[in-house]
Image (tube, grey):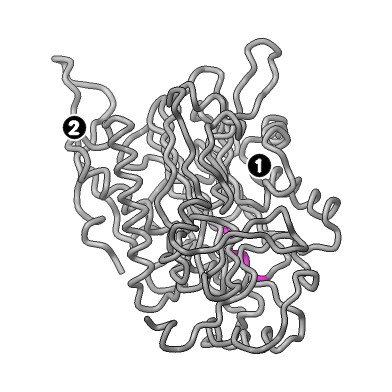
């Protein structure tokens, strides 16, 4: 499943220079997908940590963990290059979509960067914007044409952060989020700065200050505006509205069916909605780091549903061990789920904590995922995921809200029922759901011909 465009060589600028002051260049060969398990500095295993970051994920009570995360130290052959990502899957095969994006998107980003610049990763923010957009587009195209992974009613969010020296380049689709922990020069404490926008279906065309991202406008100028998600979806004949029992959760619906009720405006996959306004084009941001900036938190919405940005920053900054900071944040979110929503199914949570000074504590003995195994064609995963994959029924794999014991739930228990299983006549009620917020409400009632087309 290797991609020939991602397996070639690219020229990168090495640190330091020759005696005449000119920078030396060396060749960096991007690995193939089937070689990812042998890449040093690439971490995705649970409770993993590298020389710059820690990661942790915990399965919720919806079934198989559909979250995935990544740290890649030395990305692109740069000593100070670190790529981080969090991917939150949804739908019957959302866990596979998230892992596919985790494995393939970095290689597509490297390929896109090589196409945008002859100087390796040394290029301006405008070129990085183009590279991220190109990589996300290629990733979605890969999912659409994948021979064995059905993403028609499944998808994934993606929030990715590339650190190169004193620059952060960020791209995101969906509602996973990146938050910066920065030291307050006056009070001396830590303050939270939200670096990305949660791309919900009702996001209007609004200046950034109204969504608590004032600092980003300093970098982008006073004309910085978030695109109107609802306007785009409605122009494409998609519908946006919230269910009566969850008025705070706007969703995307097909023009001809009250399905699937996707709770985000952009995602990988979800091809049943791609003709109706849901896109995979990422929002892109650039942030110039200062000495005040301490760390970046990337997390899935399972964390942000119960913790504020400031609470998350306080938890990470107070962690006695940097290598355990991601775990501490996930465990805190899990406790909050039980306290705030005791009758709800806890959502999956995944966290990456990237420390911007490039230092970890003394527990930095684990710097590579040496026991990686491949459990699905073209995707590398950790042993914990292998155990999860053995679960036989889709009733534990999906984020579709169904009534326990209903005909719809029984229909979804078969592998081939991901589309046709939703065609029963049961009247779904949002009050019967036991999760607080699901990415999808139900699978659309497509005929076989329309599903194939």
| Mark before the other along the chain sequence, 1 or 2 | 2
Q: Check contact, mark 1 vs mark 2: CB within 8 A.
A: no
The answer, for residue 125, to whether it is visible in the render is: yes
**Is residue 356 inside the magenta stretch?**
no
Name the residue rendered at 28%, 36% in the picture.
Answer: 127
With respect to residue 277, does 112 lie above or below?
Answer: above
Query: Which quadrant is the C terminus positioned in?
Result: bottom left
| Residue 315 placement, left or right of 253 | right
Name the residue rendered at 20%, 34% in the picture.
Answer: 119
Which disc, if any, is residue 25?
2
Residue 405 at x, y percent in the picture:
76, 86
Which disc, if any, is residue 262?
none
Q: Nearer the viewer, residue 438 or 61?
A: 438
- Corner quadrant of residue 101: bottom left
Name the residue rendered at 55%, 86% in the picture.
Answer: 417
Prevailing secondary structure of the magenta residues:
loop
> Spatial distance from mark 1 to mark 2, Cα to Cα?
36 Å
Residue 368 at x, y percent in the picture:
47, 49
CA neighbours of label 2 inside 10 A, class few (<14), some (14 to 19), many (20+) = some
With respect to residue 218, does 80 lie above or below?
Answer: below
Q: Which residues are magenta?
A: 63-67
Q: Residue farthest to the left? A: 20
Which disc, if any, is residue 324?
1
């Amino acid at each position: 499943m290797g991609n020939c465009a991602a397996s070639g060589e690219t020229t990168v600028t090495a640190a330091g220079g020759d005696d005449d002051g000119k920078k030396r260049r060396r060749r960096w060969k991007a690995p193939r997908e089937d070689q990812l398990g042998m890449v040093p500095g690439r971490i995705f295993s649970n409770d993993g940590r590298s020389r710059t970051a820690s990661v942790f994920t915990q399965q919720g009570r919806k079934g198989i963990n559909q979250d995935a995360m990544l740290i890649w130290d030395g990305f692109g052959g740069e000593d100070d290059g670190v790529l981080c990502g969090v991917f939150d899957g949804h739908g019957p095969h959302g866990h596979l979509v998230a892992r596919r994006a985790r494995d393939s998107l970095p290689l597509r980003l490297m390929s896109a960067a090589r196409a945008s610049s002859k100087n390796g990763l040394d290029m301006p923010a405008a070129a990085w914007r183009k590279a991220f957009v190109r990589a996300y587009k290629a990733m979605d195209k890969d999912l659409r044409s994948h021979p064995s992974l059905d993403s028609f009613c499944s998808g994934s969010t993606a929030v990715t952060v590339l650190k190169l020296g004193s620059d952060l380049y960020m791209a995101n689709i969906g509602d996973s989020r990146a938050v910066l922990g920065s030291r307050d020069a006056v009070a001396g404490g830590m303050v939270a700065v939200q670096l990305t926008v949660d791309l919900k279906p009702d996001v209007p065309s609004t200046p950034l200050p109204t969504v608590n991202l004032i600092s980003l406008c300093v970098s982008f100028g006073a004309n910085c505006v978030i695109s109107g998600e609802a306007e785009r979806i409605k122009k494409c004949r998609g519908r946006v509205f919230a269910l009566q029992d969850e008025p705070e959760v706007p969703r995307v619906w097909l023009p001809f069916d009250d399905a699937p009720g996707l709770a985000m405006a952009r995602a990988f996959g979800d091809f049943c909605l791609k003709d109706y306004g849901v896109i995979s084009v990422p929002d892109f941001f650039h942030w110039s780091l200062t000495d005040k900036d301490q760390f970046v938190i990337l997390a899935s919405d399972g964390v942000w549903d119960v913790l504020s940005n400031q609470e998350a920053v306080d938890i990470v900054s107070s962690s006695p061990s940097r290598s355990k900071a991601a775990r501490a944040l996930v465990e805190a979110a899990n406790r909050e789920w039980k306290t705030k929503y005791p009758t709800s199914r806890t959502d999956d949570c995944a966290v990456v904590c990237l420390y911007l000074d490039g230092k970890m504590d003394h527990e930095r003995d684990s710097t590579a995922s040496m026991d990686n195994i491949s459990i699905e064609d073209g995707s590398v995963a950790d042993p914990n995921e292998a155990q999860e994959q053995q679960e036989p029924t889709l009733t534990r794999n999906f984020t579709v809200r169904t009534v326990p014991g209903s005909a719809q739930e029984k229909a979804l228990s078969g592998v081939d029922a991901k589309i046709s299983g939703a065609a029963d006549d049961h009247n779904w009620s949002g009050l019967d759901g036991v999760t607080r917020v699901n990415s999808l409400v139900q699978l659309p009632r497509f005929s076989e011909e329309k599903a194939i087309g």
